[in-house]
Image (cartoon, rainbow, N blue to C red):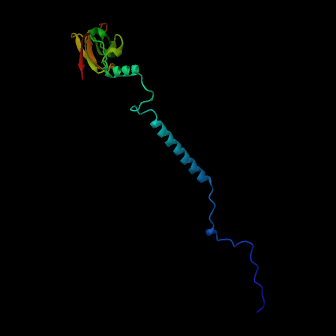
């Protein structure tokens, strides 16, 4: 055969098949993951600092040496009992009462049927009422054709009033209905 020279070598390596080529990953994912890690670390560090700052009452806040006057005041304050709060005595004169008509049905000359509810108002500062006490407030409603109607309302938590509405029958539409408190009893729970 003839003296053939081999073909010249190419300047670059032969291309790889498409399945062997690995695409370059962008750095965007690395930046996002790094940023998220930094935010999480900052939140955790802030939580540790906030949780550890000033919430431990067992450790003294100052390291200055107390003088004799400071010790005397501290000892006296620690030994003094906490005074029990005092509350006003609650009685019949502690409240005013009115009636609120919630239903009314009149039957000409036969009279009317009314449903009424007590409207109770404390005279003075309601903060003077013991918060844990329960007061039974008895009242008398006049104007019902069969005689006075006695009702009881229960006052608790200084502002919660529980009662049952009263149903009255009056002899006419002009009958005046009135109410007055007859008794206040304190119950403790």
The mark tally for this picture is 0
The residue positioned 49% from the left and 43% from the top of the image is 44
Residue 3, compared with residue 136, is above or below; it is below
User: In the rendered image, is residue 42 in sight?
Assistant: yes
The residue positioned 40% from the left and 19% from the top of the image is 69
Q: Nearer the viewer, residue 58 or 44?
A: 58
Lateral position of residue 55 relative to residue 96, left or right: right
Q: Nearer the viewer, residue 147 or 57?
A: 57
Q: Nearer the viewer, residue 114 or 124?
A: 124
Q: Nearer the viewer, residue 51 or 178?
A: 51
In the displayed orientation, state which residue is furthest to the left: 146
| Quadrant position of residue 78 | top left
| Quadrant position of residue 164 | top left
- Residue 85 placement (x, y as % from top left): 31, 17
User: In the rendered image, is residue 100 in sight?
Assistant: no
Lateral position of residue 82 relative to residue 41, left or right: left
- Residue 40 placement (x, y as % from top left): 52, 45
Question: Can you say which quadrant of the picture contains the N terminus?
Answer: bottom right
- Residue 90 placement (x, y as % from top left): 28, 12
Residue 166, compared with residue 56, is above or below; it is above
Question: Can you say which quadrant of the picture contains the C terminus?
Answer: top left
| Quadrant position of residue 109 | top left
- Residue 107 placement (x, y as % from top left): 29, 13
The residue positioned 75% from the left and 73% from the top of the image is 11
Residue 112, compared with residue 28, is above or below; it is above
């Amino acid at each position: 055969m003839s003296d053939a020279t081999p073909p010249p070598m190419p300047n670059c390596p032969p291309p790889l098949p498409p399945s062997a080529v690995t695409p370059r990953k962008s750095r965007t994912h690395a930046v996002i993951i790094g940023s998220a890690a930094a935010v999480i670390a900052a939140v955790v560090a802030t939580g540790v600092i906030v949780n550890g700052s000033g919430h431990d009452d067992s450790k003294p806040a100052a390291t200055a040496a107390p003088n004799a006057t400071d010790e005397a005041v501290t000892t006296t304050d620690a030994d003094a009992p906490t005074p029990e709060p005092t509350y006003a005595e609650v009685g019949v004169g502690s409240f005013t009462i009115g009636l609120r008509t919630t239903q009314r049905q009149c039957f000409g000359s036969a009279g009317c049927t009314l449903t009424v509810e007590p409207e109770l108002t404390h005279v003075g500062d309601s903060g003077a009422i013991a918060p844990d006490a329960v007061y039974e407030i008895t009242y008398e409603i006049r104007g019902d054709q069969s005689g006075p109607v006695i009702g009881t309302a229960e006052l608790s938590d200084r502002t919660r009033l529980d009662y049952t509405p009263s149903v009255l029958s009056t002899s006419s539409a002009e009958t005046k209905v009135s109410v007055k408190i007859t008794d206040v009893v304190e119950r403790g729970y």
